[in-house]
Image (cartoon, rainbow, N blue to C red):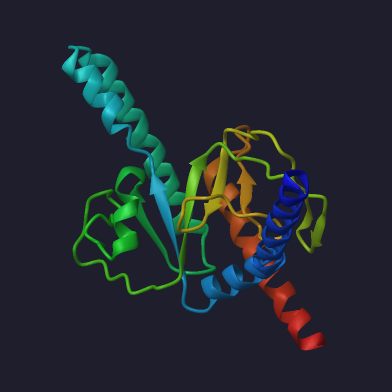
Amino acid sequence: MIKQTLLLLFAFTYMAAAAQLDSLPSDKDLAKKYIEELREGGAIVVRLKARVKAIAAYRSSGENAIANRMQEEDQKLNKKIVEAFTGEFRFCPVYFTYANTSRALLSGNTSHLLNRDLNPDSTISFKHTNFLFVDYGTSMLNESTNSYNYTYGNTTEGSTPGNSQAYVVLDKEFMQLHAPFPYVVYLNPFEHNAHGKAIARLNKKLFAYYAFIQKKKVQK
């Protein structure tokens, strides 16, 4: 009797979990939602590097030379990222904030938004409800059984950490998006103006996927 009860309980739990999974939007549905929201009134918020805790720790231990070098490295990288987006990104409005202050934006606090000189700027107006984040760092290749084809080429996914030099699109929970959304572009360090060219590729991919979605809607 106990065994039968346990089996029934297991079956009920399994069916409830399966029903919940079936009710979740698919990767394709989310990709369509995100790309249309971005293009039709949305925005990208780029999270810049700020190793505040590490730099403070080095300073507190008297290692000012190391702290200064880290700060200079972050500033140099951040300027390259800002220049790349301002020069090459046209798909939607783009804003900048430091990674360690980006969560404040979720509660409507825009005081941490930065101008092109990487300074907080209270004159920046941010009225977007729909927005996604972009990080520069390591991409995680999400496991998928499908391969999605667009005019920009073939997008596939895996299940292990990917290239550590990548621009990655994140949702508001700071989770990496999935294909078919064009969620990642890789930096080629051997290219001249590598950051600019990577963002140009991201811009092209977003436009291509948006056009793909609009064409599908017309064909229905």
* In-image side of 97 versus 186 (left or right): left
Q: Can residue 207 be seen in this view?
A: no
Q: Quadrant of the C terminus?
A: bottom right
Identified at 17% across, 12% down, the residue is 62
Question: How many numbered marks are there?
Answer: 0
- In percent of width and height, residue 41 lies at 47, 78
Q: Nearer the viewer, residue 184 or 172?
A: 172
The quadrant in which residue 51 appears is: top left
Identified at 19% across, 19% down, the residue is 59
* In-image side of 153 versus 103 (left or right): right
Identified at 42% across, 53% down, the residue is 46
Q: Is residue 56 visible?
A: yes
Location of residue 136 with respect to 106 vertically, above or below: above
The quadrant in which residue 15 appears is: bottom right
* In-image side of 147 versus 97 (left or right): right
Q: Nearer the viewer, residue 9 or 169?
A: 9
Q: Nearer the viewer, residue 185 or 86?
A: 185
Location of residue 149 with respect to 187 vertically, above or below: below
- In percent of width and height, residue 156 lies at 77, 48
Q: Which of 15 and 220 is in front in this view?
A: 15
Location of residue 48 with respect to 23 vertically, above or below: above
